[in-house]
Image: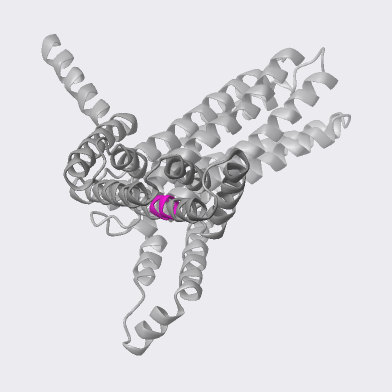
């Protein structure tokens, strides 16, 4: 039985590695570059047409959307560079001052044709073409090889559909939520007793380091959003993108408030160095409240990353129950803090701040608040699409074709 479990774990690990973005990118890029080189050998007059595999290597991306957008910009950059080189070769040839002018002109043309990150590629293409003797033949050969590489790169993602990275983005969001949960549990344990200033300060540093985690999760979410665009395997791509993005926004707000809460605990520890942060009974309630909120944050992350309706309903019911319990504990804490302030009002501002910060987190996690944000985001997206494509909007209205976002809006109301 143990061998079966170990074999299953190894198989799952192998499958997971084959779906890893780095592995997928390496395999797809290698295949595209090789095919582009083989085709260029037959069509290009160059003996070693390395521009084709180079273009395919740079065009192929993890997602179909980024492949299409990158391929168009790269082809534009190379063609623009070749045309600039042809013009310079006919007028001045290659000298030190003409090379300087060529670079300046190429960079200016790159910005003019809006190739974004491929602006340096315009100058590179121009210099490579200008540096050879048979400029005309080499220029057109380079354009041909670039087109071959771009077409092969685009075809690679069309034939070998790239994976949808929603699962990986969901795992990143849940991982962030669990790190927030662990920090809140640690803060709650320390709030129940005497907390040295050094420990409170360390928790504050941990809360600040969550910003780096958010950046990493945001990068994973952007990749997932790109993988949903123009993907024929995804029916509700917009809804998935909005659910994940608004979910990450909520978690980001919670981490900001948690950082403020850690700052409040640090200030309390400084002012009450010889005493516990809270009275014995109050500290126990603070610990319980932070534990309940920490569990609710994880449940919220599970909810926004769940796309099956039955599982989503169960996750929402669990989150609602946890928030209801946390609200009851919050009310009890408010009463205890009021009684403590009436006995000793020295730190009433900081104790009131604790209650305010807890309320903010609970409000951000509220299911009704989340549904409202989803609807607002879908409405904003629909408005932007109508403004960006007015002709398509008028055609749809004349044909009385309902907007696809309306179904997303109805689904969002149930999420």
Which corner quadrant holds the N terminus? top left
Image position, residue 283 (x, y; %): 67, 24
Nearest the eye: 237 or 20: 20
Nearest the eye: 49 or 315: 49
Residue drawn at x 54%, y 36% as measured from the top left: 215
Q: How many marks?
A: 0
Name above or below for residue 224 compared with residue 197.
below
- Residue 214 position by quadrant: top right
- Residue 35 position by quadrant: top left
Name above or below for residue 202 compared with residue 263.
above
Nearest the eye: 24 or 121: 121
Does the magenta stretch mainly form a helix, a strand or a loop? helix
Outermost residue to the right: 346
Nearest the eye: 22 or 134: 134
Which corner quadrant holds the C terminus? bottom left
- Residue 327 position by quadrant: top right
Outermost residue to the bottom: 398
Magenta region: 74-79
Image position, residue 176 (x, y; %): 49, 32
Outermost residue to the top: 2
Does residue 292 appear anywhere in the picture? no
Image position, residue 238 (x, y; %): 38, 59
Does residue 258 appear anywhere in the picture? yes
Residue drawn at x 52%, y 59% as measured from the top left: 373
Would you say residue 394 sits in the magenta stretch? no
Residue drawn at x 16%, y 44% as measured from the top left: 42
Name above or below for residue 57 compared with residue 389.
above
Q: Is residue 142 left or right of residue 361?
A: left
Q: Is residue 319 left or right of residue 259?
A: left
Image position, residue 201 (x, y; %): 72, 19
């Amino acid at each position: 039985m143990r061998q079966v479990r170990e074999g299953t774990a190894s198989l799952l690990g192998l499958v997971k590695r084959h779906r890893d973005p780095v592995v997928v990118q390496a395999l797809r890029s290698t295949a595209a570059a090789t095919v582009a080189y083989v085709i260029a050998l037959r069509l290009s007059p160059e003996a070693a047409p390395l521009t084709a595999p180079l273009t395919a290597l740079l065009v192929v991306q993890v997602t179909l959307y980024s492949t299409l957008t990158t391929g168009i910009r790269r082809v534009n950059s190379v063609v623009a560079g070749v045309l600039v080189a042809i013009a310079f070769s006919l007028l001045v040839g290659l000298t030190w001052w003409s090379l300087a002018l060529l670079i300046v002109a190429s960079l200016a043309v790159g910005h003019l044709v809006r190739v974004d990150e491929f602006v340096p590629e315009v100058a590179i293409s121009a210099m490579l073409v200008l540096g050879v003797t048979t400029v005309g033949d080499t220029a057109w050969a380079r354009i041909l090889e670039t087109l071959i590489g771009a077409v092969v790169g685009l075809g690679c993602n069309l034939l070998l559909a790239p994976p949808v990275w929603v699962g990986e983005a969901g795992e990143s969001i849940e991982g962030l939520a669990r790190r927030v949960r662990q920090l809140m549990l640690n803060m709650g344990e320390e709030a129940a007793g005497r907390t040295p200033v050094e420990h409170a300060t360390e928790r504050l540093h941990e809360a600040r380091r969550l910003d780096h985690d958010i950046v990493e999760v945001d990068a994973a979410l952007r990749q997932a959003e790109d993988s949903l665009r123009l993907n024929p395997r995804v029916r509700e791509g917009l809804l998935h993108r909005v659910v994940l993005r608004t979910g990450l926004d909520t978690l980001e707000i919670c981490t900001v408030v948690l950082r403020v809460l850690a700052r409040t605990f640090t200030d309390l520890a400084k002012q009450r160095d010889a005493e516990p942060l809270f009275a014995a009974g109050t500290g126990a309630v603070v610990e319980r409240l932070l534990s309940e909120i920490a569990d609710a944050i994880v449940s919220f992350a599970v909810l926004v990353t769940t796309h099956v309706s039955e599982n989503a309903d169960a996750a929402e019911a669990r989150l609602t129950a946890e928030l209801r319990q946390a609200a009851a504990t919050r009310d009890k804490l408010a009463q205890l803090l009021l009684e403590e302030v009436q006995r000793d009002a020295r730190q009433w501002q900081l104790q009131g701040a604790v209650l305010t910060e807890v309320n903010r987190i609970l409000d951000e996690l509220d299911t009704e608040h989340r549904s409202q944000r989803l609807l607002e985001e879908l409405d904003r997206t629909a408005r932007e699409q109508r403004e960006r494509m007015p002709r398509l909007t008028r055609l749809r209205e004349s044909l009385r074709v309902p907007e696809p976002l309306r179904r997303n809006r109805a689904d969002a109301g149930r999420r």
